[in-house]
Amino acid sequence: MTALPIAGRWFEHTRIDDRITLLWEPHVIPLMRCNIWHVRGRDRDLVIDTGMGLASVREALADLLDLTGRPVTAVATHGHDDHIGGHHEFDDVVAHPTEAPLLLDPPLRSLVPREAWGDEAIDALEAMGYPMPYSHFVDAVPAGFVMEGFRQQPVSAVRTVSEGDLLDVGDHAYEVLHLPGHSPGSIGLWDPASGTLFSGDAIYDGPLLDELPDSDIDAYCATMDRLLALPVEVVHGGHDPSFGRTRLHELATAYLDVRRQP
């Protein structure tokens, strides 16, 4: 197997405001480089998605932020490989019931795309406009990482959440929105007080994947209708930069224009 260079630092981060910090893994290929959101609450913190799991996201958060004295809930917006690699590091893990089995038994057992997903899946992604000229999902590995025998680690338990449930952090309460289409159990977290939506892969400012084996275009269209009606101020997506209401309407409308053509 091809040896990869050692990364000096695995995570990068930027503070969005006093409550929200974004982490990402710069050495993960763009398709798999998810946004990892840390939300500070008065009584509890949230980590929304956790990346690939090659290095400890919990340790990175502890180095960057004061986590002392507050419990942490790790939210999975859905169960795809690029979003769940670090959830096993947390005692309280929440996901939609449909996605929970993927956290309890993650399927990713190789960092070589065609070994991990098979030729048919890679060919389908390339047909959707995602070229995969990469030998691995990463261009480097963290210090001490062992490539042979890699597999994403399972969580010990999942606390399931559904439409309308609240995740209360003390000074804010985030409402769970069921936003299917990209995957059956995709969820977002909605803070009506600030108009902030953590959308996972339901919507982000890049090419949306709606032809995966568990995707549903009709459900995705219904999710876009719902997002258009939501009084959003800012969207923090599962990939790519955050954006506001105007861009949300542009993205959702463009999607519906394509998928609802006669």
Image: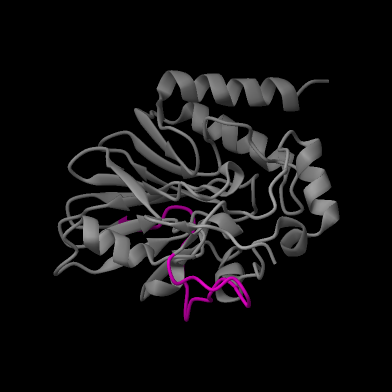
Per the rendered image, the range of residues in magenta is 143-167
Q: How is the image coloured?
A: one colour
Q: Position of residue 188 (x, y in %)?
A: 46, 47
Does the magenta-highlighted stretch encompass residue 225?
no
Q: Is residue 142 above or below residue 180?
A: below
Q: Position of residue 92 (x, y in %)?
A: 36, 72
Q: Nearer the viewer, residue 215 or 110?
A: 110
Total of numbered circles in the picture?
0
Side (left or right) of 25 relative to 179: left
Q: Is residue 218 above or below residue 96?
A: above
Side (left or right) of 154 relative to 221: left
Q: Residue at x 35, y 57 (%)?
A: 47
Q: Residue at x 35, y 47 (%)?
A: 12
Of all residues, the one furthest to the bottom in this rendering is: 156
| Image quadrant containing the C terminus | top right
| Image quadrant containing the N terminus | bottom right
Q: Is residue 203 above or below residue 11?
A: above
Q: Is residue 149 above or below residue 41?
A: below
Does the magenta-highlighted stretch encompass residue 156?
yes
Task: Say which quarter of the image contains residue 31.
Answer: top right
Q: Tell me which secondary structure the magenta stretch mostly adopts.
A: loop
Q: Residue at x 52, y 47 (%)?
A: 33
Q: Position of residue 179 (x, y in %)?
A: 55, 45
Task: Say which quarter of the image contains residue 143.
Answer: bottom left
Q: Nearer the viewer, residue 90 or 55?
A: 55
Q: Residue at x 53, y 76 (%)?
A: 154
Q: Position of residue 206 (x, y in %)?
A: 57, 31
Q: Nearer the viewer, residue 134 or 5?
A: 5
